[in-house]
Amino acid sequence: MADAWNKKYVLKHKNIAVTEIELDEATGAISAVGPATDERHLPIGVFVRKGRIDRAALNEWWRGRAIPASRDGIKEALLELRLSTTHKLLDKSLGLSLSDQYWICPLDTDAAWSQYNFFENDFSEDVGNVLLGKGGSSEAISLMSPDNTSDGWLKKKWTIMDGRRCLVKGGSGATQQEPYNEVLASKLMERLGIPHVPYTLMVQEDYPYSVCENFITPQTELVTAWYIMQTQQKPNHVSVYQHYVNCCEALDIPDIVEALDRMIVVDYLIANEDRHQNNFGVVRNADTLEWIGAAPIYDSGSSLWFSKPTALISATRKITCKPFKTDHAEQIKLVTSFDWLDLSRLHDIEEEFREILKGSLFIDETRKEALCTTLRKRIEMLSEIVQSFTTTGWSDDRKSDVSINVAYSGGEKADNDN
Ligand SMILES: Nc1ncnc2c1ncn2[C@@H]1O[C@H](COP(=O)(O)OP(=O)(O)OP(=O)(O)O)[C@@H](O)[C@H]1O
Ligand SMILES: [Mg+2]
């Protein structure tokens, strides 16, 4: 569809024109950008300097909308779609997403957001099926898909179930553990009263998938922490945690410290290894630009020793930690209050985990047992930490701060394993 149109577009935020851009046909990058027509509606982290929009920042944001080149199975998917890079998919669906309200409208057309957005209009599942490795249809593939702008490493697709937009996400490796972890994390947060995205399990052709509903509506949008952290220069003496809190406070985003307390606790309990800066964030009203608050916790699957062989499942062995510290034992010290936390509500949660894992063909009995026992140990370890916490708390001395921890580097996710 877009191919027949000019390669000049208006970048829009719903129906508000933000600026004009030109896309380079060969690379899909923004080759030219006009003046800002509504500076307030620019993507967060993209600024106007000396009267001009920072094209490098806008390009980084634009390329960051594409499916990462590291996505599991992307080479095969691109072959099937007959495309050289995932960036080429962006304009095919007008850059529309189900996580925010930006899109590109071909210049000199008066297309309205209501005609195209994926919240209110049905969409093809062709691209999603190809991404899940379930393509192979000989018929022409429709490229009008919200999957063109989906982030993350795991195979996934958006689908419409009973009129609701849902994200279906697979697992990885020999144990395919991530979908089970998402469900366990949901149950754990439900018990602790922590705002979260609920995930359920779906099994198709013996493979597990997690399913969660879109938490974004046509009136809201997700802005991930990485973009929030671009709104200010981080001074060297300020820790990553404090920098994020400072940025949120400067923007007047409510209740961030409380939300971070809860996220850090969850990640400690489930031994999360991948809470990078695009795996949490805030929600704003896309019409009024009012900040609503922290996004409910999503993407908690890269946890619970998902990539470790059974013999290395241990509550005390050091594992990767993000986004603030390189070690969970240090990161937990950033929590300002445990007053809200009632660990007795996790009584028997390991039994619930055992139930969740029951049907898996990929996780054997020894592993199931090790996972449940070790989850219980994490709860006991946290309980000891809570008891040692005094009213004065701990200080954040930047010890074990993550070094760069950018979620993206040149449009690609950086390897920020520690
Ligand atoms: N329920 C949802 N509603 C709206 N947007 C969502 C939802 N779940 C995920 N997203 C968006 O989709 C992106 C990819 O999803 P997710 O983080 O779950 O995938 P992933 O492959 O596990 O990522 P990673 O590479 O971080 O492991 C998220 O970063 C977020 O922007
Ligand atoms: Mg993610």
Image (cartoon, rainbow, N blue to C red):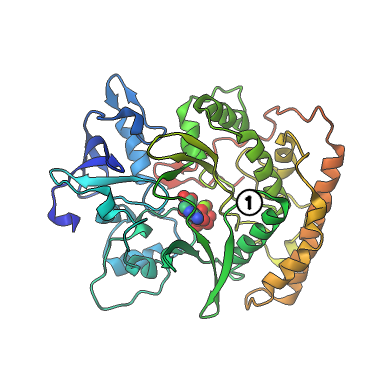
Q: State the SS at label 1.
A: loop
Residue 28 shows up from this direction = no
The x and y percentages for residue 89 are 29, 56
Which residue is more in the foreground, 294 or 311? 294
Residue 61, given in percent of the width and then of the height, sits at: 37, 40
Q: Residue furthest top?
A: 50
Query: Where residue 117 sits: x, y (%)?
Result: 31, 53
Task: Give the residue drawn at x 58%, y 62%.
Answer: 199
Residue at the image position 39 percent from the left and 54 percent from the top: 67
Q: Nearer the viewer, residue 19 or 373?
A: 19
Point out the residue furthest to the bottom here.
Answer: 205
Task: Give the quadrant of the N terminus.
Answer: bottom left
User: Is any atom of residue 372 visible in this view?
Assistant: yes
Residue 353 vs residue 259: left or right? right
**Three-letter amino acid code of the residue under disc 1:** Glu
Say few, some or many: other residues with alpha carbon within 10 Å of mark 1 (under 14 / 14 to 19 / 20 or more): many
Residue 288: give x, y in percent of width and height. 40, 35
The answer as to whether callout 1 falls within 8 Å of ligand 1 is no
x 30%, y 77%: residue: 137
Q: Mark 1 points at which residue?
A: 273
Left or right position of 249 against 413: right
